[in-house]
Image: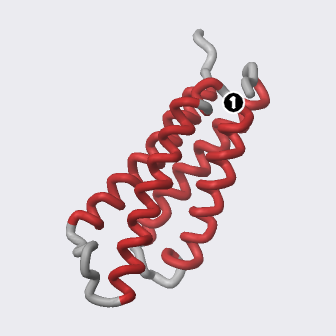
Amino acid sequence: MKEVRWSLVAAGLYVLWGVLHVGLGVAMLAGADLLAPADEAVAESAMFFACAVVLGCQAVAVAVTMNRTNSRRGYWLNLLVLGVVDAIFIPVMVVPGHVDPMGGLSGPLVWLAAAAASTVALLREPVTR
């Protein structure tokens, strides 16, 4: 039986997190009037979704270049940056009901699985810088 490469599992899950956020951000920005937002709330929403796209791209880039090779730096980058984003997202957006709980918790649950897989990888597989 072939042994599981936890670093590849973690990288795949972080890529999934990134793709979910890039897809959501692009979908929401596609309908937004970015050149002349109607009011401050619309501008803030556009900025929120632009940040989702940027963080999604960061998640994918770190996963493909660093988590895949079990990099200690990549571990901390995606663990902390994405973890903080999701930790803030839950009380600010999910708990008050601004987003659907199932959709709103999908990102944090994928992050939790990726964090667990990358931690197992760090403990069981050869580590790179």
Q: Residue at x 46, y 57 (%)?
A: 106
Residue beneath disc 1 = 71
Q: Residue at x 63, y 28 (%)?
A: 6
Locate residue 125, reporting x and y percent: 73, 21
Locate residue 75, reporting x and y percent: 68, 39
The quadrant of the rendering that contains the N terminus is top right
Q: Secondary structure at mark 1?
A: loop
Of the pair 118 and 46, the residue shown nearer to us: 46
Q: Is residue 1 above or below residue 68?
A: above
User: Seen in the image, is 113 located left or right of residue 103?
Assistant: right
Residue type indicated by callout 1: Ser
Q: Residue at x 61, y 50 (%)?
A: 112
Of all residues, the one furthest to the right in this rendering is 123
Colouring mode (rainbow / by chain / secondary structure / one colour): secondary structure
Q: Is residue 21 above or below residue 11?
A: below
Of the pair 61 and 23, the residue shown nearer to us: 61
